[in-house]
Image (cartoon, helix red, strand yellow):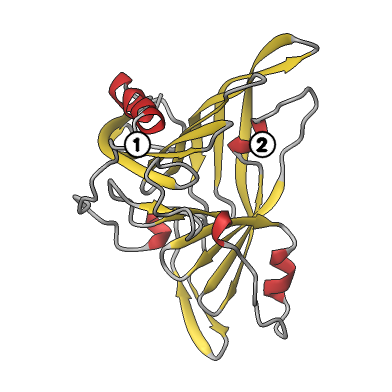
Amino acid sequence: MVAVFTSASLACMSGVMSTPTEQPTLQAPTAVLETTDNYFPLNEGAYWVYTGTVKWEINQKIEEKSLTWKMEVVETIKSGSIIGYAMKGHPSDLAWYEEGKERSDYAIIQVGPSRFYKADIEVIDRLKDETDSAVDLVHESQQFLDIPLLPGKRFCEVEQITRTDGKYCWIVHEEEKVVLEGITGIPSETKSAYMLTFATLPDHIIIQFVPGVGITQYMYIHHGTVSEVDVKLIEHYSGRVQTQATSDNNHTVSHSVLE
């Protein structure tokens, strides 16, 4: 199974929440994958399967359940420099879990080579509409990834980005070497991983992201009424894109096969 957050990593997260002066220093990445397809493989048909535990509170009683959850790319739409990915399922679905909860439908919007936003599924239809100018398609608060990752990098709404307490921004913490093993579809090997955190007053999120794979661990903790999520990647398929030349806004786009 994928290596989990170390005690040092979690201590770092605790420090971010309690001592605003201890912020990670911006560093250059040791290596950068050449394409965004490799960095976050959102190819049509790609999927990630997670397993772990969720906790929630009902009638002042704490419930706990072990389960698996799937995230998958259902469809991809390209419009100029924007790519829309119709998605089904995300580890964040499990926050405030209740029996019978279903996977969410949503969109990931990639703007240019580096910025990723999690938006409502309806924006996919806008990308399909050639008359839509795509104004106001995404918002700063929806950004969850800006690649390449490097320690000290942060991304969030512009009015929050200078906060000294590190809250309400995605913050990239240390780079660690992790051993990916026991994950169906991924060969056992050592890779670089980054811890990303998003802390607010009522809750916080911790993500482990491995370039070339995606989210390998997701944790959510609410500080009041109990709602907790801790899931880890157990299976991944990177999807497949057929090699072909397609016309897109009078430009030819070449796609390569990914098995």
Outermost residue toward the top? 61
Residue 45 x/y as whole percent: 59, 52
Q: Secondary structure at mark 1?
A: loop
Point 46% across, 41% down: residue:
167
Examine the rendered structure and indicate whether residue 245 appears above or below residue 54. Answer: below
Examine the rendered structure and indicate whether residue 184 appears above or below residue 119. Answer: above
Label 2 crowd (10 A; few <14 / some 14-19 / many >=20): some
Residue 126 x/y as whole percent: 72, 72
Query: Is residue 79 or residue 196 the one in the foreground?
Result: 196
Q: Amino acid at mark 1?
A: Pro
Q: Is residue 91 left or right of residue 151?
A: right
The residue where tag 2 is placed is: 93
Q: Earlier in the sequence, mark 1 or mark 2?
A: 1
The residue where tag 1 is placed is: 20
The image quadrant that residue 228 belongs to is top right
Point 28% across, 34% down: residue:
189
The image quadrant that residue 10 belongs to is top left
Label 1 crowd (10 A; few <14 / some 14-19 / many >=20): few
Q: Amino acid at mark 2?
A: Asp
Examine the rendered structure and indicate whether residue 191 appears above or below residue 133. Answer: above
Examine the rendered structure and indicate whether residue 257 appears above or below residue 70. Answer: below
Query: Is residue 98 or residue 215 the one in the foreground?
Result: 98
